[in-house]
Image: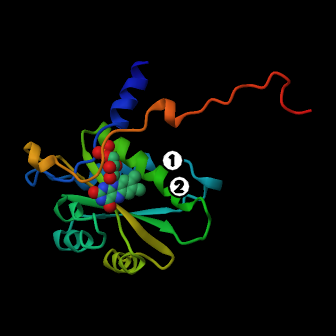
Amino acid sequence: VERLEELQALVQRPSVRCFDPERTVEPAVIEKLVDVARRTGSARNRQPWRCVAVFDRAVLQKLGGLGAYAQHVATAPVALVLLSADNGYRDTEFDLGRLAQTITLAAGALGLDSCLATIYPDANVMRAAELVGARAGWLPRHALSLGYGAVLDTAGRSSAIPTGRTALEELLTILPCSVTGGSE
Ligand SMILES: Cc1cc2nc3c(=O)[nH]c(=O)nc-3n(C[C@H](O)[C@H](O)[C@H](O)COP(=O)(O)O)c2cc1C
């Protein structure tokens, strides 16, 4: 139960979009996060992912303009650009989601805040690929801002995005076992 509570605390750590400019993140910390995340399972063990860590402020600022809600990347001490293989498999973006979740949880375990950014439309994905020097066939559709959250007043925390989570009763249906066993 204790470990489950620890996991829940990490899962529900809120996204943070404003970072303390005084607190940097060392490349060694990013290496640790990705070293944990590379152990994540993927469909057919394809591991259709690569990560580019960006510390350069000018590049971060450009990336922050490549999605309607990507601005937080511009002010983060570091962003991990997540590259997905352009391989046409329906599981690829699902796999990237698992990778991103592992990185987010590992970051939280180290006391780091984070927020995802969606890079779109496709023209911006191409621009981002150029910016980070992605090899052909690798698409940066998401980036993860990482840093230590700035202390904000309540006004600074307000967001247009609805909060809260779907209730368990609405989310989960437990299909009853049929009395006859189902197959006749
Ligand atoms: C696939 C995905 C893409 C997201 N893209 C963005 C984004 O572009 N900009 C942003 O500010 N937040 C983005 N988020 C963060 C969500 O808005 C956030 O997780 C959600 O509102 C729940 O809030 P919480 O993480 O603080 O609990 C994204 C999250 C996911 C899972």
- Nearer the camera: disc 2 or disc 1: 2
| Sequence-first disc among 2 and 1 | 1
Which label number is shown at residue 40?
Answer: 1
Q: Residues within 10 Å of mark 1 (few under 14, many from 20)?
A: some
Residue at x 48% of width, y 66% of height: 84
Q: Is residue 151 visible?
A: no
Vertical comparison of 160 with 141: above or below: above
Which label number is shown at residue 139?
Answer: none
Q: Nearer the viewer, residue 66 or 155?
A: 155
Residue at x 30% of width, y 47% of height: 162
Please state which amino acid type lies under the numbered disc 1: Thr
Please state which amino acid type lies under the numbered disc 2: Asp
The quadrant holding residue 9 is top left
The quadrant holding residue 121 is bottom left
Local SS, label 1: loop
The quadrant in which the C terminus is found is top right
Which residue is disc 2 drawn over?
A: 95
Q: Would the CB of label 2 be found within 8 Å of ligand 1?
A: no
* Cβ atoms at labels 2 and 1 below 8 Å apart: yes
Instruction: Give the number of marks.
Output: 2
Where is residue 27 shown, x and y percent of the image? 26, 56
Q: Would the CB of label 1 be found within 8 Å of ligand 1?
A: no
The quadrant in which the N terminus is found is top left
Q: Nearer the viewer, residue 69 or 16?
A: 69
Vertical comparison of 133 with 85: above or below: below
Residue at the far right in the pictured view: 184
How many angstroms separate mark 2 from mark 1 (CA)?
A: 9 Å
Where is residue 44 shown, x and y percent of the image? 65, 55
Where is residue 53 shown, x and y percent of the image? 31, 62
Residue at x 53% of width, y 55% of height: 95
